[in-house]
Amino acid sequence: MPARRPFALYPLLPKKTAFCLMQTLVAPPPIRNTARAFISLYELNARIKTTLQQPALTRVWVVAEVSKRSESKGHTYLELIQKEPGEEQPRAQIKACIWHEQSAGIVRAFETETGIALGSGHKILFCASVQFSERHGISLVIHEIDPTYTLGDLARQKQLNLERLRREGLLDRQPALTLPMVAQRLAVITSRQAFGGGDFFTTLKNPSHPYHFSGRHFPAAVQGDAAAPEMVAQLERIGAQADLFDAVVIVRGGGQKSDFHAFENYHLARAIALCPLPVLTGIGHAWDEKTLSELASHRHFITPTAVAEHLVGLSRHLDGRLDKARLVIARLAREVLGAGTARLEGAQHQLGGAARALLGDRHEKLAGLVDATRRAPLFFLAGKRELFERQRSHATYLIKNSFGRQHEQLQRVGEALAKASEGGTEKSTHYLAHLQMMLVQASRFHVRYGHEQLRHRQQELRMESLELTNTELLLLDNIAQIVHDHGRRRTEGNRQLLDWVAGNLQATVSMVLTGQQQALALHEARVAQYDPVQMLRRGYSLTYANGQLVRSPEGLRPGTELTTRLENAIVVSKVIAVEKP
């Protein structure tokens, strides 16, 4: 291909040609003496056409920016402009056309090489010829487009936008956000017709896992000129209600490279970076170079399915951590239960021994008190009986002594009378006999009276002794009964208290043991659900390298032999490459 010398649209014409054209357009016709000379509009356009038909305006390489594209009857029509940095209005503007004989081939080759659609906003280097129509005016006919120039311009523009994002600190905002351990409330931005969105939701709702996700659809175009503004609007809408979601997901299916140009938009990348929620992208391209939107996101994935699998993996990872926590809790519960049971048994043993010792001591004291209470009336009664016997002996002695003195006095009187009557008369003798008889009778009366008084006093003493003995015995019996009843109630109360404490302690220990056994049974049932064999039956697999379970890609090298255990088979494979997301 000959060397190309691109021209800007302004000035497009060579100086000599432009001078001739200006002379043709501006030079006044010769002045006639009679009237003004003139030509028709068609003749004027014909002169312009003749002037423009020069080799210098045929197959010229030009650089311009596409501002608009349209198609009609197989032809492709473009509006081309030239804008300088910082200028609002274009400095130059012209229309161009690719005729239908070449349109399909030129456009297809451009889009295949660049991976973008030929449309507004792209700078192109093209080979064109100037044509002029008396009816439609001046325009360009494009014969060829060089895609390498556009690729270079796109790369330059992407690098400028990337540097701008980095300079504004926007590339670090999303990675600084924390994705929840379980992200289940999702705001999903995708097209209504995108197949990637269907794959994403199908993976989330797959019955092979027990996790539930709620996704709200925010529709937006994912390719074309309207894609970037619509996605930016939806991101702003989501940001206004960020408390309703855990993360934002932007997904679309596969396609040509040109379908992903919207994700190179600076404003879309900026909106992703400024979103208050973590943004995950899965836009379905297979090349290594990442778009600006992916670089500004929290994390990017190759496909929508990969995003969904990552979210499911987060839930599964947390589930695994919870399983480990359950095992630790169950072990700690068993240890605490064992220690508590030992302490309860020790406390029960100590309490039982202390209660038995206390009851034994109280029982001994009570028995001594009851025995002393029973012996006290006997001692008291014996003392009273001894006092009564002494009083009776003393009264008998006094009575007998009185009777003896009276008897002696009577004997002395009788003897005196007998002596006096010896030498007396018969009348005196008779009188003395009568007096003796009266003395005998008086003596007998006094003896009987003394005996009666003695019996009466003995009866009174006996009655007083009986009354005193009965009253004291009744009082002592009452006291003994009260002491006995009080001791029995105290003993019974202590026994009931001991029985209640022992019963409640037994019931408490039984209740605690039952509750802990139920909790252990529940933990064992949950642990059984996550038995490796059960996990294998659910579709999971275990991968080993050198006999060790593979938990991370660290340590894996190309050529490492892997052994993957399935439910009914063992698969042996080798590592070709290790790629980190």
Image (tube, rainbow, N blue to C red):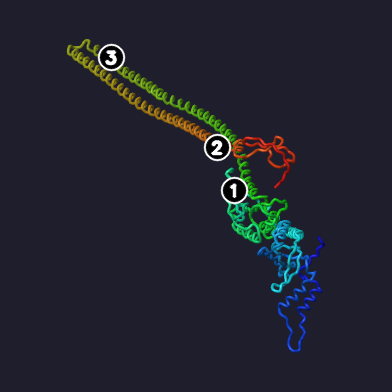
Question: Between disc 1 and disc 2, whose residue precedes?
Answer: 1
Q: Amino acid at mark 1?
A: Thr
Circle 1 — which element? helix
**Callout 1 touching callout 2 (CB < 8 Å):** no
Circle 2 — which element? helix
Q: Is residue 433 visible?
A: yes
Residue 525 rendering spot, x and y as whole percentages: 56, 36
Circle 3 — which element? helix
Residue 474 rendering spot, x and y as whole percentages: 36, 27
The quadrant holding residue 557 is top right
Q: Amino acid at mark 3?
A: Arg
**Marks 2 and 3, how far apart in space?**
122 Å
Q: Closer to us: mark 1 or mark 2?
A: 1
Residue 77 rendering spot, x and y as whole percentages: 69, 65
Answer above or below: position of 137 versus 179: below
**Marks 3 and 1, how far apart in space?**
154 Å
| Residue bearing mark 2 | 522
**Marks 1 and 2, how far apart in space?**
33 Å
Q: Is residue 166 visible?
A: no
Q: How many marks?
A: 3
| Residue bearing mark 1 | 202
Q: Residue furthest left?
A: 427
| Residue bearing mark 3 | 412
Q: Nearer the viewer, residue 38 or 347?
A: 38
Answer above or below: position of 251 versus 496: below
Q: Residue furthest bottom?
A: 34
Question: Between disc 2 and disc 3, whose residue precedes?
Answer: 3
At 71% from the left and 46% from the top, the residue drawn is: 580
At 31% from the left and 21% from the top, the residue drawn is: 458
Tell me the quadrant of the picture where the N terminus can be found: bottom right
